[in-house]
Image (spheres, coloured by chain):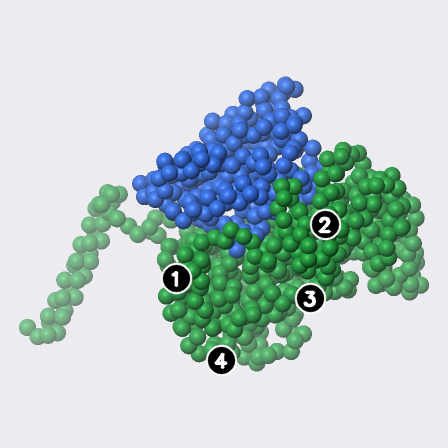
Amino acid sequence: MATTPRSGGVGGAGTATRPNGTSQNKSCQFKLVLLGESAVGKSSLVLRFVKGQFHEYQESTIGAAFLTQTICIEDTVVKFEIWDTAGQERYHSLAPMYYRGAQAAIVVYDIQNQDSFQRAKTWVKELHKQASPNIVIALAGNKADLSNIRVVEFDEAKQYAEENGLLFMETSAKTGMNVNDIFLAIAKKLPKNDGANNQGTSIRPNGNETNRPTNNCCK
Amino acid sequence: MTDEGEQQEALVKRAEDEREEIFRRYELGLDPSNVVDSWENPTFEIYHITDKYGFMHDSRLPTTRNAQELHRNNIEAERDKKWLKMLGHWPPPADKLHKRVYKGIPDRVRWQAWKRLLNVEHSIASNAGVYARMLQLARKYSTEARQIDADVNRQFRDNLAYRERYCTKQVSLFNVLNAYSIYNSELGYCQGMACVAGVLLLYMVEEEEAFWALNTLITDPKYGMHGLFIEGFPKLTRFIAHHDRIMSKIMRKLHKHFTKHNVDALLYAIKWFFVVFVERVPFSLSLRVWDIFMLDGDRVILSMAITILYLHKDELIRLKDMDAIIEYLQVKLHKNFGYNDDDAIQALERVMKKLKDLKLDALPPAKSNEFPSRKLGDFVEADMEKKIGRRRNDYTDNEKQVITDVISRQEQNAIEVQSTVSYETSECATGDGYSMKTFQSITSLATSPANSSYSLYSNGFVVTTPESAQDPARSQSSHNLSYLAQQQQQPTHPAAAAGLPNGHHMRHSFSSDSDSRNRLDLDQALEVLQRQQVYMHSSKTSNSQRVYIIQNGGGGTHITNKDDDDDDALSVENTRL
C-alpha cells in the first residue's frame, strides 16, 4: 500500500522496512482505536495520517474502518493498526469490539462543538473503566483550522487532559496540523519492551493473537 | 408615428445593442473584467467526468463509445420498450418478471419499476397526508436533525444531484430522513439510512414517494431493514453468523485466511448489508443488486456477499495482511470490480441457486426485536435524554446482546482456526500465549449457567446474557469452547473428538480435523449427495485431495483433483474482463 506521509516530520514513515537495515532496530505493533462523536473528523484524521490526503466530504463511517501506518521513532519501527469507528450513538455498542485489547486510543472532538467535547469525556470515562488498564489515551481537538469560531477553549481541554492523564493536542485534518505529531506522541509514550506491551490484551479483537507474534513488541 | 413604427424602432435598437455588446466582449478579449460562465471554458470539467448516474470521477470519461457499449445501449433501448409494456400490464407473470429483473431494469424505467416492486403508489394512497404531517412534526420535534444534517452534508457529494450544499436533493434527503425518524420513532435514524434514501431519491422527484419506498424497505419483512438499523443490530448479527456459517462450509480456505488475519465479517459486512453494497461495488452493479433485492428480498444480500468473496477469493488469499484485505474489500472493489455487471449478476444467480440447493439459504428465524413494536406513525415525544442528545453511560440489554453475539462468534472462528493451525504447522506454535487467558475466559463462558454474568474482558467487563441457554448459536459456541478445553488438556490426542457428545460431530470434523488430512467435507458431501453421486476418497498429497467421483447415471469414472477447499462446488465461471 502506498503511504506517503505528508510532512517529513516522521522520517521513514510509510514503509515497514527498517531504514538502515541494521538488526538493532526494534519493531512494534500497536492497536489504536479512534473514538468520538459523529462528524468530528475521526476518519479524516486517519486519512491524513495514513495517506496524507483530505477529503472535504469524507463518507460517513458505517461500522468501522481499518488502516495501518508505520512510523519510526529513534531505533524503533512502530506499526499502528488503526481502527476507525462510527461515531453515531447507535454504533456505540460495537465500540468495545474495537477498543478491546487496544494499546492506544485517540478520542476526538470538534473544537466548534461543545457537545462533542462532552461526549469525548464520556468516551474517556468508558475507556478508563472498560479498556486495558495501560491504554494510552490522547485527546484531539480537531478542526483547529477553524479556531476563530471555536467554542471549546484550548486551556479548558488541556486542563481536562492533564487531570485525566491524557495526551492532548489540537489538530486539523484539513491542514495536517499536529496530525503526525499526535500519533508520534502516542508512539513515544507506548512501552516498547516485551514485558510492558503484552499485558492488557487478553484476546485480540478477533481472537487469535497467537498468529500475530509482532504484537509482542521488539523482537 | 404609429405603434407599429415604434415597435420596429425598438427592435432595431435592441439589435444594435446586442451587436454592440458582442463586439465589446470580443474587444475586451482575455481582460479579467470579461467574466464568462464557467461552462464556457475548456477548464470546466464536470461534464467530461460525470457518468450517466451523475457521479463525478477523477479523470475524463471516454468520449466515444466502443462497440460493446453501443451494443448494450441498443439492448437497453429494446428492454425499455418491453418494460414500458410490462409496466402497463402489471403484475406480470412471475417468471417473466424474474428473468427481466435479473437482466437488469433499464435505467430509464428503474424508478417506475422500483415503485411497483415496493408498492409505493398503494402506500401513498392509503396514507394520504401522513408524509406532510410527519414532516411538520419533524420540524418541531426531530431529535435526529443534527446527525441527519451531518450525514446529508457528506452523502453522495460526488454526485451532481447532491453536490451543492442545500440543493434540492439535499433538502429532500434531509426532509425524508427526518420525517421517517418521526414516523418510525422506535428506529429513529441510523447512519446508513442516508445512503439508502439517497439512492431512492436519485431516481425520483417526489419526497413522498421516497419516503414510502424507504418505509417498505425498512418495515416489510421481505426486506426487514428495521432489524439492521435498530439499536443492537439484531439482524446484522444474525446475518453475519449465517454468513460465517456459509463461509465455513463452502469457502473454508478463505474463511480460515480471514480469521487468521483478523478480518472479521463485521468489518466489511456492516456496510454491505446496511446499504446493500452501494459504495462498495461500482454504482452500476449496486443498482443491479438493488433491482434483485427489491424483487427477491433480503436473502439477496447474503448471496451477494458470498458472490463477491467467491469471485475474488484467489486475490484475497494472496493478500497476506489485514489492511491489504480490507483495502481490497472497501476500496478496490468499488473502483474496479474486475467483472462486468452481467457476469457478476450471473454469478450471483448461481450462488443463490447453490445456496438453496445446499439448504444454506434458509436463515435462522428473525427475533421479534427485528420488527417495529410501536405503531408506525404514532407520534411519541422523545424523552429528555434524547432531546438534549445526551449519551447513555450504560449499555442496554439489546446492546449487550450484540456484544455477546459478536464476541462469541469471533471466538468460535478463532478457535476453529486455532485448533486447525496448531496441528498443521509450527506457524503459531507458541500456543502458550493464546492460551491460558483465552482458555480461562472461554471456559467460564462455556460453563456459565443461563442468566448468569460472565467476564469476557480481562479487565472485568461484564456482559449478562439472559438468553444464553436458549440461543442455539451460543450453545453451539459453548460446545465448541468446551471442546477446546478438552483439547487443551489432551493436546496430542486429536482423536479426543471421538469422545464428544453426539450431534456436533460434523462441526468438529471442521474445526479440529486438519490433523487427519482425510477429511470428509460437509460441503463436498452435500454437493455429492445432491448430484446423487457416490464418492469416496483416498489419501492424497499435502495440499490437494484426490477425489474419485463415480457418477450414478452409469457414466464413466471421473477423477477430480479437489482443492483443500471445495470452492468449486459453486462452479461459477471466472470470466475475467
Q: Are marks 4 and 1 on the same chain?
A: yes
Type of residue at label 1?
Val
Q: Nearer the viewer, mark 1 or mark 2?
A: 2
| Mark 2 or 3, nearer chain start | 3
- Label 1 with label 2: CB-CB less than 8 Å: no
Distance, label 1 to label 3, CA atoms, is 38 Å
| Mark 3 or 4, nearer chain start | 4
Distance, label 3 to label 4, CA atoms, is 30 Å
| Mark 2 or 4, nearer chain start | 4
Type of residue at label 2?
Leu
Q: Are marks 1 and 3 on the same chain?
A: yes
Give the colour of chain B.
green
Type of residue at label 4?
Ser
| Mark 4 or 1, nearer chain start | 4
Distance, label 4 to label 1, CA atoms, is 25 Å
Q: Residue at x 83, y 63 (%)?
A: B530
The image position of residue B491, as x and y in percent, is 84, 40
- Residue A162 at least partly seen: yes
Q: Which residue carries the number 1 mark?
A: B171
Q: Which residue carries the number 2 mark?
A: B445
| Mark 1 or 2, nearer chain start | 1
Most extreme residue toward the left, as rendered? Answer: B1
Q: Which mark is residue B365?
A: 3
Q: Are marks 2 and 4 on the same chain?
A: yes
